[in-house]
Image: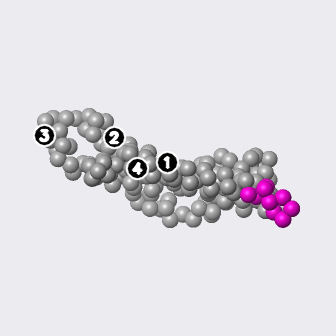
Amino acid sequence: MRFADFVVALPFLLFMILFKIAFGIGPGESGVMPMLVALVLLMWPATARLVRGQILQIREQGYISASQLLGAKTHYLILRHMLPNTLGVVLVTLTFAIPSAIFTEAFLSFIGMGVAPPTPSWGSMSNEGIKTMLTTPHELIFPAALISTTVLAFNLLGDGLRDALDARMRNRE
């Protein structure tokens, strides 16, 4: 977990600039791969912390102790009890991470650090649309509306999945 703390401490824009330099991406070239790698490398610690916390909590449950007393092997406990109980949390976390990744990509493309203009991106489309906002406002409105709608849709999906997969919430009703 100390490495995860180190990764969380890294500033994202500095990390993106270093990745563009490391991959040899020049100005005007598409930086899709470095952006994806940077997003993955910087977003995994939150999920790792959540899974670790879930595993530590599940490990203390009575049915795990009972299974161990009955002679269950470690791989059986992991596959039968721990993995299914953490899968819902991971799924919900990923559906909440997707809007963050979409917004980050759009922002980086908007400021010129992400995807270069021949490659389609809502951020670069918004950047082009802001230049002609007074004469053709639809060039800015449509990409911004699509970003907002997509982010909202994934947030609502994550919220619905959380409600559906949370066993404690089902017990209250």
Question: In the rendered image, which residue does mark 3 sit on?
Answer: 69
Using the numbered discs, state the Cα–Cα distance from disc 1 to disc 2 in whole angstroms: 22 Å
Q: Residue at x 13, y 40 (%)?
A: 69
Question: In the rendered image, which residue does mark 2 sit on?
Answer: 83
Secondary element under disc 2, as helix, strand or loop, is: helix
Q: Earlier in the sequence, mark 2 or mark 4?
A: 2
| Nearest to viewer (mark 2 / mark 4) | 4
Residue 123 in view in this figure = no
Lateral position of residue 43 relative to residue 35, left or right: left
Using the numbered discs, state the Cα–Cα distance from disc 3 to disc 2 in whole angstroms: 20 Å
Q: Specify the amino acid type for callout 1.
A: Leu
> Callout 4 environment at 10 Å: few (<14), some (14 to 19), or many (20+)?
some
Query: Do the residues bearing badges 1 and 4 touch, measured as CB atoms within 8 Å?
Result: no
| Nearest to viewer (mark 3 / mark 2) | 2
Q: Earlier in the sequence, mark 1 or mark 4?
A: 1
Indicate the position of residue 101 as horizontal and vertical percent values: 58, 53
Q: Earlier in the sequence, mark 1 or mark 3?
A: 3
> Callout 2 environment at 10 Å: few (<14), some (14 to 19), or many (20+)?
some
Question: In the rendered image, which residue does mark 1 sit on?
Answer: 157
Secondary element under disc 1, as helix, strand or loop, is: helix
Provide the residue span drawn in magenta: 133-141
